[in-house]
Image (tube, rainbow, N blue to C red):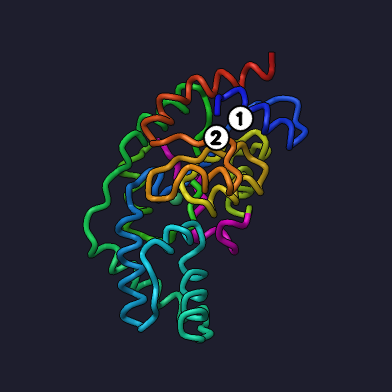
Amino acid sequence: MTEQNAIAGYLKYTGNKNLDIKAALIDCDGVLFDSMKNHTRAWVKLMQKNGIKCTRDEFYMYEGMTGVEIIKKKFKEGAGKQITDDEAIALYGVKGRYFKEAGETPVMPGATAMLEALRDADIERILVSGSMQPSILDRIDQDFPGLMSEKRVTGHDVRRGKPSPEPYLKGALKAEAKPNQCIVIENAPLGVQAGHAAGCFTIGVTTGPIPEKDLYKAGADIVYPSMEALAQGLPALIAAFKQTQA
Ligand code: MG
């Protein structure tokens, strides 16, 4: 998919005349941090300790839902148990401990270059994550000091996780931009669905086992094979956005 084709497709289905991009709404896990291996490991451990059958791969598919939503779903489907919010929050705390024990989470290769390419184009950068994981959220200030904390959307701010458009609509509000003035950067199918449902031009990046075609199926306007590829491709994509205003 060329940049021009992706943009033409977006303009056609949205009915917009041009793209005037002011902000980038950026997912955290699997985008800024190469954290999904540790997350899926922690999820499997939590389920096994509670006698609930699961596969590691399924947690890549749930990425973007809030932790409480994932726990309630698995306990219902896997054990026929309806658990309360308080119980789910307590279990999410245990999962957070397992995540921390799984080891240091590396920064995603290419993430810093991607953020710099956006900054150089005067595109505001807003973090939008369903995560409430303190070990990750605390590291953002340290590893990505340009991402302003007062303009972040996290699991604490949203009632409904992805694929609901709510997190990305809130991100657009924080950017003081309309959704169609925002791009979304996502690695997970549910996150791509959320960005697409919010009306944003949605960029998928394959940084884990989920193939490109699944991100297109979820509604991605364009998909890049790695964060490094996105960082390299952003100047051309941004130039193509500007051409729509010529
Ligand atoms: Mg993600």
Q: Secondary structure at mark 2?
A: strand
Callout 2–callout 1 Cβ contact below 8 Å = yes
Q: What's the amino acid at mark 2?
A: Ile
Picture layout, residue 193 above or below residue 69: above
Q: In x, y percent, where is residue 197? A: 66, 49
Picture layout, residue 41 above or below residue 8: below
* Residue 150 forms part of the magenta stretch: yes
Q: In x, y percent, where is residue 46? A: 34, 74
Q: The C terminus is located in which quarter? A: top right
Q: What's the amino acid at mark 1?
A: Ala
Q: Is residue 18 left or right of residue 208?
A: right
Real-space CA distance between mark 2 and mark 1, rounded to the nearest whole angstrom: 6 Å
Q: Is mark 2 within 8 Å of ligand 1?
A: no
Q: Residue at x 35, y 54 (%)?
A: 36
- Pick whichever, 206 or 148, lies toward us: 206
Tell me where the magenta segment starts and ends, as one range.
Answer: 146-164
- Pick whichever, 216 or 37, lies toward us: 216
Q: Residue at x 65, y 26 (%)?
A: 20
Mark number displayed over residue 222: 2
Within-10-Å neighbours for mark 2: few <14, some 14–19, many 20+:
many
